[in-house]
Image (spheres, helix red, strand yellow):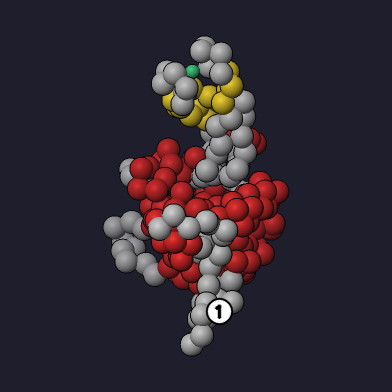
Amino acid sequence: MEGPGPFVSDLPLGDSVGSLKGMYMTGWGNVFYNYSKRLEQLKYFKIPKPFGFLLASSEPQKIEVLLWESFQCYLLNLPNASLPLIIRVLEIALKQKFQNKSQQNLRLVDLIDLAEAQLKEKKEMAHAFRRLRNIIHENTLISEQTSLDALRYISDIVNTLYPSPQKVRIPMKCPYCGKQGKIDFQSNECYIGNEKTYNCKCGKTIYPLIL
Ligand SMILES: [Zn+2]
């Protein structure tokens, strides 16, 4: 095989090795450009961050990491890495909701059936379930679009099963003075990529982002 083909991600790994040798890095500008383009796309779809599930989970930190890595992989054009991570979030959320003593070791497809039955009143979710079933049965390499669809529909389903609170208070640390602060996001503001201004007592303005 000759050189990198079109299947290679736009992460310029070769360039980063080159940079160690003091070579000029041409590829990173492109990565940042594409990263922010994808972030804009996430914002456009207003994909909810499932705070309701994070609050209900006994392992919120684990969920946070899986969510964060899944979205970061998408943003960095690694759709095949993103998809299994978000599916894991879905599986944990559905098991917590539907698995009990009489129903142990349910398969993901069974759990999805149970979730759809519970949300059958919400007609707008039907498409999300249909698309999700196609995605989990995909046997080929995952496209950027498929990975985006999975992030959208899984976040929607989890957020509907575990409704978010009216207001989410997120702790934050000012990167300038190090002071701890808190910032409130209303439930309709809790979508991936959304940012708010935060005025620290030290006089600096920060733009914390939901991700
Ligand atoms: Zn500060």
Q: Which residue is mark 1?
A: 5
- Outermost residue on the left side: it is 101
Residue 179 or residue 131, whichever sits in front: 179
Secondary element under disc 1, as helix, strand or loop, is: loop
Indicate the position of residue 14 as horizontal and vertical percent values: 46, 66
- Outermost residue on the bottom side: it is 1
Left or right of 19? Residue 116 is right
How many numbered marks, from 0 up? 1
Indicate the position of residue 203 as horizontal and vertical percent values: 56, 13
Left or right of 89? Residue 35 is right
Residue 27 or residue 62, whichever sits in front: 27
Residue 122 or residue 41, whichever sits in front: 41
Instruction: Say which quarter of the image contains residue 193.
Output: top right
Q: Residue at x 42, y 38 (%)?
A: 55
Instruction: Say which quarter of the image contains residue 7.
Output: bottom right
Residue 89 in view: no
Residue 177 in view: yes
Q: Residue at x 62, y 29 (%)?
A: 196
- Outermost residue on the front side: it is 22
Indicate the position of residue 103 as horizontal and vertical percent values: 34, 63
Q: Residue at x 59, y 21 (%)?
A: 205
Indicate the position of residue 74 as horizontal and vertical percent values: 54, 59
Amino acid of disc 1:
Gly
